[in-house]
Amino acid sequence: MDIQVPALDRTLRPLPTAPIRIVHLGLGAFHRSHQAWYTQHSPDAADWGIAAFTGRRPDAATALAAQDGLYTLIERSGNEDTFEVIGSIVEAVDGADVGRLCELVSAPATAMVTLTITEAAYGLASDGTFDRSSAGMAGDLALLAGGTGGTGTGGTPTTPLGRLVLALAARRDAGSGPLAVVSCDNLSGNGEVARRAVVGMAEAWKPDLAAWIGKNVSFVSTSVDRITPRTTEADVAEVEDRCGYRDSSPVVAEPFSDWVLSGDFPAGRPRWEEAGAVVVDDIEPYENRKLWLLNGAHSLLAYAGQLRGHTTVAEALEDPVCREAVEAFWDEASAHLQGEDLHIPEYREALRGRFGNRRIAHHLSQIAADGTTKLRMRALPVLAAERSRGRSGAGSALMLAAWIDYVGQQDSLQDPLATAIRKANDSAGPAGSARVAALLGLVSPQLSDDPEIVSLVAALCGTLATETTGRTSTPSAPHLIPGRNS
């Protein structure tokens, strides 16, 4: 069947020809279920078209371009599905088209660049500084040094960060004025992370560009939240059956969504707050709530759940051992989340319901990717806070132990330090504190340098039995180490 593009309700949704004022890097399911959704639901949406660029592959852009950027959002609750056509993405572009990226970012009408490029793509070392020696960053710096800009000869960058820095150079050269860079990745202080990454690469390439960025580019921090699993062929078939048209690129999401933003938008922004977003002066408590309680629990379930034979978040949460491990980690994290506005008991209860939605097939293998980067943001802050209070931090240490057990069983890994993980596994042997220390050092050198933490994590390794061994024979996670904060 040919693709049939549904007509937009022009009174409610932006026209396909809405002017491009937002450039997005990282065209994927989450961007389409979250930022594009909020933009469509803003009252001034017709003034804010999005041009979205893919990351590693052009496939999503190719499919969306064939549908004039339109796609169906399937909102999936525990009982039913609802369908909505989203039209805020007015141009879908292959990320390799760096010339078009430079053209759009340098256009005076462009007010911001939003990012969902994954935590690992910012090119920062474990101490938070820009790592110009890493493979991707070093390669892009060599390409930038050999090129003459987005339209000249020579190489062009291959990473999202390198492409963004080149596009910002084009904006400076065009004299198009200030704009905002808005990170929507799951990182604590993601606006500051983006600033260090962008300025770090610019400084390594052209110090005068770094100075211009410092004066003309604001970096907005956000906390984003909407569970968005991978789309399946069954989802494509359901849209065709229920809606009467074929959509090659629907997106599935839970009904819940949350977006908290903090920072300046020197060239303006949509009225996202009227679509349900929250604009605050201090974002840290909100991002910690999300990073620790939602993302931290996701990482713990991703590793513990797969060790115990599960494939989805809902399956893992039904396992009493995994459930107790999550509750133990939540107890530790909640002790460091203060403020009535955060509504922590209600947030935890909502997460139990969201995680338990079996109609959202959120695959643990997807969450498990890029563990060395994610664990720095999700486990380490809670572990450090607990130990500063004189407690063991066993709940957060178990997340690290589960990751160590998990990577020891995998033949292939999606992680920026996959080669180093394999080397640590091979050189230090399958068990023992030496292997634990080597792997912890890849997450943070401070961990491997602390013998008490190494001993704690080593004691927890191997305690999550596989499902086939039977749950009753394995002690439940919260009681593995005495002194857990209760």
Image: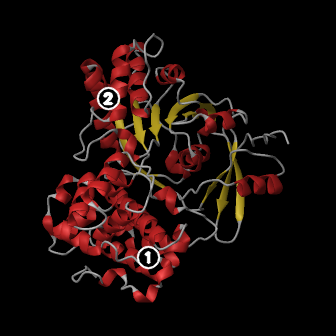
Quadrant holding the N terminus: top right
**Vertical order, 330 against 274 (above or below):** below
Residue that sits furthest to the bottom in the current view: 472
Q: Which residue is mark 1?
A: 322
At which x and y percent is residue 368? 44, 58
Residue 336 is situated, as x and y percent measured from the top left of the image, at: 26, 68
What amino acid does circle 1 point to? Cys
**Residue 100: mark:** none
Q: Residue at x 20, y 66 (%)?
A: 454
Percent of width and height locating residue 325: 38, 76
Residue under the image location 71 percent in, 63 percent down: 81
Residue type, numbered disc 2: Ala
Q: Quadrant of residue 168?
A: top left
Q: How many marks?
A: 2
Residue ID at (37%, 84%): 476
Residue 138 bears which disc, if any? 2
Give residue 209's position: percent from left, percent from top. Answer: 30, 20
Pick the residue in front: 203 or 21. Answer: 203
Left-right relation of 201 to 387: right
> What residue sits 26% from the left and 55% below the top?
427
The mark that comes first in sequence, 2 or 1, is 2
SS for dot 2: helix
Image marks 2 and 1: residues in contact by CB distance under 8 Å: no
Q: Is 4 or 267 nearer to us in this picture? A: 4
